[in-house]
Structures are given as C-alpha cells and as structure tokens.
C-alpha cells in the first residue's frame, strides 16, 4: 500500500512539471542563437520554425547526407512528396547548415522549445547578438548580402537569388563570450557556397517590430492548405508523438563527426561546449595535457628550451677554444724535425771527412 501511495504521489508531482514549458534563461538563449543569429532573415526564420520539428530535421539531414550533390531549388523539389513541414523542406537547399543541425539534436530540441515558448525573447536576443557583431566589425554589407537598419532592428537580406550561408565562429564575431557557464554549440566549419533559389523561395520573414515570425505567402514547395499567411503558429505536426531526445542523440552518435549534447539538471548545468578537443580525448584530458606544457615566452620558446639552447652554445664554444690552442705546437713540430735532420746530416758529414 505504501508503495502504491508513493507512486501516485510521484505521478501527481510530475504532472504539473510536464505541463509547464521550460523557461530558458537569457544566458541559454544567447548560447542557443549565437550560431545562427547572423544568417539572412529568411534562412533564420526557417531555421527557427524547423527546429520545432526536430524529428523531421533529423530525417531531412539523413536525406541530404545521402544526396550531397543536390542543393538549392533542385533539392527542395526532390523532397516535395516528403511529409515534412515546409520550413524543414526549405533547409535541404542548404546542406552544410542542415548537416550541422542534424549533428546537434539536443541543440535543435532546445532551440525549438525556446522558440515555441519564448518567441518574443528569441527575436530580441537575435537583435542583441547582431548589434554585438556589428560593433565588433563582423556584420556588415558585402557583395552577397545587404545589412541595414529598420527602426531599431538590423536586417540581413541576400542581394540576389544566389544565397550564401556562411560559417562564423561565435567566439570571434561577438567578441569575448560573456556567459562562463553557457557557451554556444561548436560546429565544424564549412566553406560558403552559392545556392540558387527561385523567386519567393523564402516564404517567411521575421517581423522585428512585432517580435515574431510572419508567413508572407504560400511556399512554392508545399501544398496550399499547409501554410496560411500571417503570424506563424505551430502546425498540426506538433500534436503528434515524436521520438525522445535520447533516441535522436543515439542516432547522431553513430556518425564520427557528431558531438552529443545531453540536457543536465539546471543545478548542474555547465557550458554546452568549452572547446573543440580531439574526438578521442575528453576535455579534462586535454586540459591536463596543456597544463604539463611550459608556458611560452615572448620570443616563442619556453624557458627550459632557452636554457637548453644557451647550454648548447656554450658547449660548442669550449671545443673551439681547445682546438685553437694546440695549433702553434703542431706548426713547431715539423720545424723541429727539420732542424734535427740537418744536425744529423752534419754529423754524418763529419764522420765521412774523418774516414777520408
């Protein structure tokens, strides 16, 4: 009886916790959005919407990995019949970005949960990150994209139908990272490549003033009844059961380039990724090995190396001095031998004269 009561009590205590969505702190939002905040507005809005369908993102990443030569509109048309949300289908146009999302299932889950529960704060966080990058000189207009103010917001748009989705290091573009216990996810760098998209490819855009994502027209790669113009709202797929995070992490761990991210209790939460250690070593091992190395001096050599180099030079000077000292004695030796031969010859000459 006591066991039954204890189980019922635990169940009742767990129900309210499951019903309430998790609230992400500002430090967590900064870390979650840092890898994507500088992408063009259309790409950013579709990433945010797609993150609310983490299972479909994983399936799209698998499809993209199996079809690496298909990009842009060709890739989107190829997945037309897939039962995915239009935002997920749009991401197959950018295989490098989609591959990193597929390798970070925990990050995708967290980003989708944060966007569903705290959409306005997510949009504000993106703008705060863009202001930091602009102040650091890493967010500026170029030949591929336009960067301009719209009220108090910073807008990033591609200049043509050829879209570039570049990789950038969050630890560089935003300046020194300001949250010691919450750090951005580490993604493998990729070289940006041009991706051609048709007119009207980006069917959504951020409404920075209202702080939400807005659907501006029906996507060309999805049936008309799936998406309705106006403020974006979660679709019917969100009501369907999905795989657990552990299953997604387990699937991603089968690939060698995957970095696992498992949610920890809030009281024990640590930075998502502190560095990019060698895959065969843990962070602790890398830190221990680094502490054994001598700190480099200003000239690039460690102090023990300087000491060894100085001793090596001193050892070389001493043999040179010893080799120079015997030289006069070696020169005097032959002269002395000649004098002895002359005296010997003179002695023999005297003996011959005496005999005669």
Image: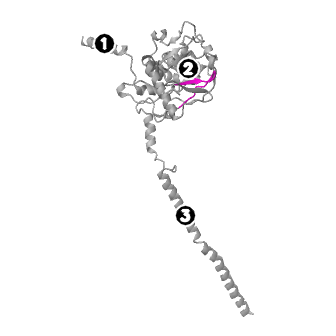
Q: Which mark is residue 354?
A: none
Q: Looking at the image, is mark 3 or mark 2 nearer the viewer?
A: 2
- Residue receiving disc 3: 317
Residue 329: x and y in percent read 60, 75
Q: Looking at the image, is mark 3 or mark 1 nearer the viewer?
A: 1
Residues under labels 3 and 2: Cα distance?
70 Å
Image height of 168 relative to 59, above or below: below
**Residue 245 appearing in the image:** no
Apparent side of residue 188 relative to residue 351 in the rendered image (left or right): left
Q: Give the residue at the far top of this rendering.
A: 225
- Residue receiving disc 2: 42
Q: Which of 54 and 201 lies nearest the eye of the viewer? A: 201
Q: Which residues are magenta?
A: 154-168
Q: Is residue 272 magenta?
A: no
Apparent side of residue 8 relative to residue 215 in the rendered image (left or right): left
As helix, strand or loop, the secondary structure at mark 3 comes to helix
Q: Which of 305 and 84 lies nearest the eye of the viewer? A: 84
User: In terms of sequence position, does the residue under pointer 3 or pointer 2 come before the other?
Assistant: 2
User: In terms of sequence position, does the residue under pointer 2 or pointer 1 come before the other?
Assistant: 1
Q: Give the residue at the far front of this rendering.
A: 151
Q: Is residue 157 magenta?
A: yes
């Amino acid at each position: 009886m006591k066991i039954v009561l204890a189980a019922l009590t635990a169940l009742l205590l767990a129900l309210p916790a499951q019903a309430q969505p998790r609230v992400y702190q500002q430090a967590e939002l900064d870390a979650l959005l840092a890898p994507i905040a500088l992408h063009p507005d259309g790409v950013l809005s579709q990433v945010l919407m797609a993150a609310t369908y983490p299972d479909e993102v994983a399936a799209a990443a698998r499809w993209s990995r199996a079809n690496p030569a298909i990009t842009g509109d060709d890739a989107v048309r190829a997945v037309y019949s897939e039962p995915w949300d239009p935002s997920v289908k749009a991401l197959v146009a950018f295989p490098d970005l989609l591959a990193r999302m597929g390798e970070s299932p925990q990050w995708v889950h967290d980003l989708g949960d944060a966007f569903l529960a705290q959409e306005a704060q997510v949009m504000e966080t993106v703008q705060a990150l863009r202001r930091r990058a602009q102040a650091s000189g890493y967010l500026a207009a170029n030949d591929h994209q336009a960067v301009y103010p719209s009220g108090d917001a910073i807008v990033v748009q591609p200049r043509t139908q050829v879209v570039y989705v570049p990789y950038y290091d969050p630890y560089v573009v935003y300046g020194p990272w300001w949250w010691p216990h919450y750090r951005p996810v580490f993604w493998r760098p990729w070289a940006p490549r041009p991706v051609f998209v048709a007119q009207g490819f980006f069917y959504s855009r951020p409404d920075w003033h209202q702080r939400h994502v807005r659907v501006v027209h029906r996507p060309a790669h999805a049936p008309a009844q799936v998406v309705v113009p106006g403020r974006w709202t979660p679709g019917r797929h969100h009501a369907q059961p999905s795989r657990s995070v552990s299953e997604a992490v387990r699937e991603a761990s089968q690939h060698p380039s995957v970095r696992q991210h498992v949610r920890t209790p809030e009281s024990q939460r640590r930075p998502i990724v502190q560095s990019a250690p060698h895959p065969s070593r843990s962070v602790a091992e890398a830190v221990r090995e680094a502490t054994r190395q001598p700190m480099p001096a200003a000239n690039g050599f460690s102090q023990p190396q300087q000491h060894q180099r100085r001793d090596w030079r001193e050892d070389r000077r001493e043999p040179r001095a010893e080799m120079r000292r015997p030289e006069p004695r070696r020169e005097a030796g032959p002269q002395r031998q000649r004098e002895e031969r002359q005296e010997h010859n003179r002695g023999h000459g005297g003996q011959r004269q005496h005999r005669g």
